[in-house]
Amino acid sequence: MAGHSHAKNVAVRKGKQDAQRAKIFTKVAREITAACKAGMPDPAHNPRLRAAIRKALAENITRDKIDDTIKRASGAGNTENYDEMRYEGYGAGGVAIIVEALTDNRNRTASEVRAAFTKFGGNLGETGSVNFMFDRVGVVTYPLAKASEEAMLEAAIEAGADNCESDKEQHMVTCSPDTFGSVRASLEKKFGEPQSAKFVWQPKSTTAVNEEQASSLLKLIDALEDNDDVQEVFANYDIAEDVLERLSA
């Protein structure tokens, strides 16, 4: 399975994260807080906050918890501030990895991310050491039932998107960062709120790994995703389906 289908890889291993509901809430709460700090606390006028709320709801976080987080973040006495950080490096088999984090302590996060890379056979590099292997793109997704493949493709073209792919679960519309806002708005007008809308690092090509390398790589990704500061992990791996199933058993 290729790294650009990362969402599917995560879905296979999602049971591990389902047992960590509090940790998931911590990550989402940080994104909600950062979104409020960066813009208005009103989701109607803050696309980043809307996206964070959608993510929270998808994780079955209650509206009361979401509202409480927004109130705390926008309160006059709130001093929580999170810096957006990006870490880049290589995992087992030479797989390129990008880690995005929100942290209130850069030194702590850098140390913990570096330790995870070292423990599982990887190497943390300098910022910019691997991002040339990826394209930064906007991705807007809708459930498959929202529209036919042809209708979604037509709407994506009209919105100015670069591509639209549909699989058994969802429609995925991709666009450049410059057109992300207008593409999202156009699709929302036609199909309503998307399932998700965010920026991702899309691999330009993938790196095939054997079972031993895949084992170390997935342990590294799990360790990174288990870190409260880490929001997203992107990698350009290509793991065979049968290998992934054995490792996920």
Image (cartoon, grey):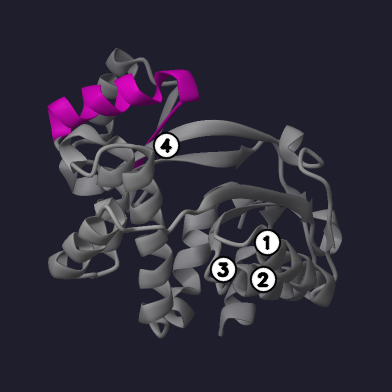
Residues at marks 2 and 1 touching, judged by CB atoms closer than 8 Å = yes
Which of discs 3 and 2 lies nearer the camera? The answer is 3
The amino acid sitting under disc 2 is Leu
The answer to which of 190 and 67 lies nearer the viewer is 67
Residue of label 4: 139
Q: Residue at x 39, y 25 (%)?
A: 180
**Disc 2 element:** helix
First in sequence, mark 1 or 4: give its number. Answer: 4
The span from disc 1 to disc 3 (Cα, nearest Å) is 19 Å
Q: Position of residue 202 (x, y in %)?
A: 59, 39
Q: Whole-Å distance between the Cαs marked 4 and 3?
A: 20 Å
| Depth check, front residue: 116 or 67 | 67
Residue 29 spot, x, y in % from top left: 35, 63
Query: Which quadrant of the structure image shows residue 227?
Result: bottom right
Q: Amino acid at mark 1?
A: Ile
Rendered view: 81 above or below 38: below
Mark 1 or mark 3: whose residue is earlier in sequence: 3
Which residue has dot 1 on it?
239
Q: Which residues are magenta?
A: 171-191
Residue of label 3: 225
The residue at 82%/41% (across/down) is: 129
Q: Give the amino acid type for the residue marked by disc 4 in the picture.
A: Val
Please, what is the dominant secondary structure of the magenta stretch? helix
